[in-house]
């Protein structure tokens, strides 16, 4: 005996088959609107999150701006009273930004939990309405994975990816405005390095896309094996045919494949971040060099505090850029989860229950068999001219030898 998953065979380790490559979901207006439809009921809360992120971004940049005055007027100017006052303001601003961040995190988590609550309920109701054939022809592990880990992954997208995009865009905008207010030459010089960040993004995105799909496929297979071999009926079959060792080896083989895929997926993002970190270190060096030349050779009115502020703001700007590049890679991964969930939502319901939502929980009426005959194969009747009635509230016993049609009548 062999217990096999009904999931189709995938491509090699870490690669997609040609069919899967052709069916990769594309970022379309329809897909984005469909994702937004789950966010729409909570638009007020999300607007409040946006306001909190904006305030936090503005307050987060102020300490860097105050650094210039702390250095020029407090330290170099030797004004102790002003130094203490500026430090107190910087501390208060930082504390306020952190408190707003706590509120934003709570509200963001609340939104994520409620959206996934809606998705789970909708998915469960949809699966309950699917015909019995759906559950006999689809891998049980795949069904459970989409109900659990896939929808849980959506929560991470809402509370992490989407919020990070908004937060980083706002922080980047505020930092750019503050930099250009200080010195447009140094600001332009600092952002010249930004285009280098986009070079490795496309390649890494494609790599992680393929690895993510393959990891999810292996997860489905693992869940399928667990459901098939650790259920009551599955364990009975395994023991009857003495297949304990064979099933253990099959599970170990897929588990080993998942280890390799997970390592490859994480390392793909790691090398990407190393490249970004290297590129981002060039900007401050250029600011110090050009700022020093302007101060020493051209008699510019730039001060030590001004250059320090520019470097600090540059750090505030590069951090969102790095995050946005990372988010671009993670966004590709997120689409895979949404696509898998929408695939199940799009399954048509072949039979709609005639019982309305306001109908009593206990069915009313009568079941009547009148001269019923049935056969699975021609010339091999299972039921022949069966007649009986079952009134509402009553029970009936169906007895007979094995193969006489008891289960067929029940079904």
Image (cartoon, rainbow, N blue to C red):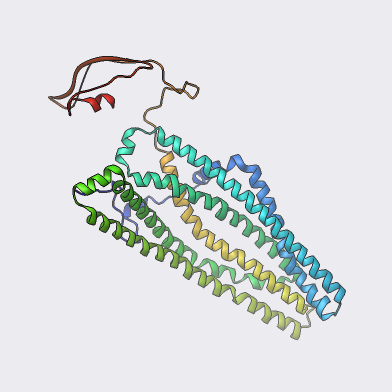
Residue 394, located in which quarter of the rendered image? Answer: top left
User: Which residue in the rendered view is the most extreme toward the bottom?
Assistant: 297
Vertical relation: 180 (above or below) 4:
below
Image coordinates for residue 403, horizontal then vertical, percent: 17, 28
In the picture, the quarter occupied by the C terminus is top left
- Count of numbered marks: 0
Image coordinates for residue 174, horizontal then vertical, percent: 70, 61
Vertical relation: 163 (above or below) 297:
above
Image coordinates for residue 235, horizontal then vertical, percent: 27, 47
Residue 319 visible in the snapshot: yes
Residue 370 visible in the snapshot: no
Residue 350, located in which quarter of the rendered image? Answer: top left
Q: Residue at x 77, y 69 (%)?
A: 66
Q: Residue at x 51, y 42 (%)?
A: 34
In this view, the residue in front, 207 or 196, is: 207
18 displayed left or right of 39 = left
Vertical relation: 235 (above or below) 95:
above
Q: Residue at x 62, y 55 (%)?
A: 166
In this view, the residue in front, 184 or 350, is: 350
399 displayed left or right of 302 = left
User: Which residue in the rendered view is the most extreme toward the left?
Assistant: 379
Vertical relation: 106 (above or below) 399:
below
Image coordinates for residue 87, horizontal then vertical, percent: 79, 70
In this view, the residue in front, 251 or 166, is: 251
Q: Residue at x 55, y 41 (%)?
A: 37
371 displayed left or right of 181 = left
């Amino acid at each position: 005996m062999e217990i096999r998953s009904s999931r189709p065979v995938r491509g090699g380790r870490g690669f997609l088959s040609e069919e899967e490559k052709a069916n990769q979901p594309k970022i379309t207006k329809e897909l984005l609107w469909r994702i937004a439809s789950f966010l729409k009921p909570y638009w007020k809360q999300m607007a409040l999150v946006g306001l909190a992120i904006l305030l936090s971004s503005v307050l987060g940049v102020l300490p860097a701006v105050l650094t210039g005055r702390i250095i020029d007027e407090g330290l170099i100017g030797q004004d102790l009273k002003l130094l203490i006052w500026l430090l107190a303001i910087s501390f208060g601003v930082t504390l306020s930004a952190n408190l707003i961040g706590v509120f934003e995190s709570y509200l963001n988590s609340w939104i994520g939990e409620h959206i996934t609550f809606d998705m789970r309920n909708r998915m469960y109701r949809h699966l309950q309405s699917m015909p019995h054939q759906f559950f006999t022809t689809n891998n049980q592990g795949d069904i459970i994975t989409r109900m659990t880990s896939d929808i849980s992954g959506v929560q991470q997208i809402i509370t992490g990816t989407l919020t990070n995009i908004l937060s980083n865009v706002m922080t980047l905008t505020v930092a750019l405005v503050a930099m250009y207010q200080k010195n447009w030459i140094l600001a332009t010089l600092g952002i010249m390095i930004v285009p280098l960040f986009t070079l490795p993004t496309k390649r890494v995105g494609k790599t992680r896309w393929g690895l993510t799909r393959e990891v999810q496929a292996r997860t489905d297979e693992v869940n399928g094996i667990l459901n098939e071999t650790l259920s009551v009926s599955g364990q009975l079959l395994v023991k009857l045919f003495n297949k304990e060792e064979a099933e253990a080896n099959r599970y170990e083989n897929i588990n080993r494949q998942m280890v390799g895929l997970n390592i490859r997926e994480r390392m793909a993002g790691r090398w990407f971040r190393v490249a970004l970190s290297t590129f981002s270190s060039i900007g401050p060096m250029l600011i110090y060099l050009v700022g020093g030349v302007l101060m020493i050779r051209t008699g510019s009115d730039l001060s030590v505090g001004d250059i320090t502020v520019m470097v600090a703001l540059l750090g505030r700007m590069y951090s969102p850029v790095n995050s946005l590049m990372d988010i671009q890679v993670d966004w590709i991964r997120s689409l895979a989860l949404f696509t898998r969930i929408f695939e199940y939502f799009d399954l048509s319901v072949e039979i709609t229950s005639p019982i309305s939502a306001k109908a009593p929980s206990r069915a009313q009426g009568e079941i009547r068999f009148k001269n019923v005959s049935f056969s699975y194969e021609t010339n091999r009747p299972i039921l022949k001219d069966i007649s009986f009635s079952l009134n509402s509230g009553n029970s009936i016993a169906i007895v007979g030898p094995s193969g006489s049609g008891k289960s067929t009548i029940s079904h």
